[in-house]
Amino acid sequence: MNGADTAFVLISAALVMLMTPGLAFFYGGMVRVKSALNMLMMSFISLGIVTVLWVLYGYSLAFGDDIGGGLLGGFDHIGLKGIRPETLTGGKEGIPVFAFALFQLMFAVITPALMSGALADRVKFSAWAVFIALWVTIVYFPVAHWVWQADGWLFKLKVIDFAGGTAVHINAGIGALAAVLVVGKRIGFKKDPMRPHSLPLVMLGAGLLWFGWFGFNAGSALAANGTAANMALNTQVATGAAMLGWLVYERVRHGAFTTLGAASGAVAGLVAITPSGAAVNAFGAVLIGLVAGSVCAWAVGIKFKLGFDDSLDVVGVHLVGGVIGTLLVGLLATDGVGGLTQLGRQATGAFAVMAYSFVASWLLAKLVDRTIGLRAAEDDELAGIDQAFHAETAYDFSAVGAISATRGGGHPAGPGHAQDDRDRDDQSGTQDKKANKKVDA
Amino acid sequence: MKLITAVVKPHMVDEIKAALRTSGVRGMTVSEASGSGRQRGHTEVYRGAEYTVDLVPKIRIEVLAEDGDADTVVDVIVKAARSGDQGKIGDGKVWVVPVETVVRVRTGERGPDAL
């Protein structure tokens, strides 16, 4: 076992884990106040659902021995069966399979979460939970197998996807588009102002994503070596360049350098360098970043022309950015790899994932919609789905308006605690009254 | 008694408050408001989607005064709320309405004694 590599992959796994809460903030800040919590939860819940599915059967479907044709892993590692702490991947000098499985789990967690941005403000939370469980099972686990398992058909085709341009970003981007077509537009799309409620949250989320993405990209080397270092450097370079590309486009087109543009440009650059960063040099990374930033800045406007409500631009950033990175590496790859042959392989990989993910995601969204219903009730959507599905309000700036529904009622605690509870309730009751008084005066 | 209501630019509030205190006014209620008058709003852009924000942030100041003091209070507010010598569009408005009665909650005093 290689201790340095193992330590690096374990730390990278933790970095990638942080990306999902980061994504939650990135998306959460972009929606209106009334559905901010739901947006956070749509990402965060993936850390629960996908984690459990991954150890039950996800790892086995993605990285178990191929069942034929490079399409899917077998059931030999159900419940991580047959893997022990000392089981290694990558030969005698490799890393524990547990470290690899944990690292790959984080990719499986964030990919469905990426789609949530397209469905902001209008999806039943329970239906979303069912959808992502189905989606990772039918779409993500197989596609991860195609791209990263040594017997996967895209892997054998020599498609370069170092850290997930196809399996993660194209996959989530096109899946989000399919889901949007099933769910439909938000009430008031293109008519009502839908301003982001907190750009500082968006920037915080983008910062956490950028930070975590070093684990996502460099960690995908699965070793603390030169490839990881090159990938880490290019991750930084392309992201910086993409932010500049987006901001310049915006300044020319719309007259301002926006905070949202800086955050979005950075994410577009991260997406585009994900498949490509280990195969290009620093100049290639600058070029990929500039192209991704400026093209994505343009692409986020397409939805208004075509009329699909990809609310937070998952298609415009992740699908478009993923395709840019996946195709450009075909041309820009160093060491004599880049060229038209490789470009053809890259296009095949991108198209295969797009076609499969679009069809499967559409069918799954339809299935959920026809059975339990995917769309929230109109009244709930108008009032804000935070209250309908989470029974909470994101921000409480007011001392009035809420009373304790359990005050004076039954207490769940045992008889020994009942008196204490009542005392505490009485106190809080007095405080409530005081607060009300202050406001009235 | 009169209720004097002023809707003014947010950054003028401290000056108005100080001027009112100097002129002897002790109580006031200040709240955040948004509104539109002759002042035009502004345009914001989010990922290329442009929104015209036509309700501008304002501060509403409410002061209760005796009939004879109302004009003075209005003058004090208007003077402090005006930008420069000429004033600018968006400086706000002040208006006065009659008040039937006022009660101080603590003592139950009514009328001018409660002011």
Image: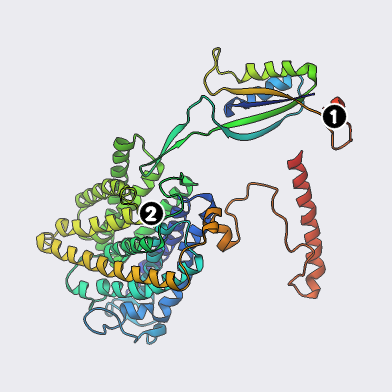
- A346 lies left or right of B84: left
Placement of the C terminus of chain A among the 4 image quadrants: top right
Task: Tell us which disc is closer to us: 2 or 1.
Answer: 2
Q: In this view, does A332 lie to the left or right of A127?
A: left
Which element carries disc 2, helix, strand or loop? loop
Tell me the element at label 1.
helix
Q: In which quarter of the image is residue B66?
A: top right
At x 40% / y 47%, what residue is drawn? A190
Where is A299 relative to A40, above or below? above
Residue A297, position in %: x, y?
31, 46
Q: Mark 1 lies on which chain?
A: B
Q: Residue A422 carries which label?
A: none
Q: What residue type is labelled 1?
A: Ala
In the rendered image, which quarter is residue B1 located in? top right
The x and y percentages for residue B4 are: 71, 24
- Tell me which corner region of the image, top left, top right, bottom left or bottom right, holds residue A86: bottom left
How packed mark 2 is, by other alpha carbons closer than 10 Å (few <14, some 14-19, many 20 or more), is many
* Relative to A142, residue B81 above or below: above
Which residue matches tag 2?
Answer: A309
Residues at discs 2 and 1 both on one chain: no
Residue A246, image x and y in percent? 31, 44
Q: Which residue is at a point 76% across and 70% down the rendered structure image?
A: A411
Q: Which of B25 and A21 is in front in this view?
A: B25
Q: What's the distance in space between the residues labelled 2 and 1, CA to CA?
A: 57 Å
Q: In which quarter of the image is the N terminus of chain A?
A: bottom left
Residue type (three-letter) at the residue carrying disc 2: Asp
In the displayed image of the protein, which residue is found farthest to the top? Answer: B85
Q: Where is residue A31 in the image (x, y as percent from the top left)?
A: 47, 51
Report the residue at 75% width, 46% height from top: A436
Mark number, residue B114: 1
Chain assignment, label 2 = A
Residue A193 seen from this side = yes
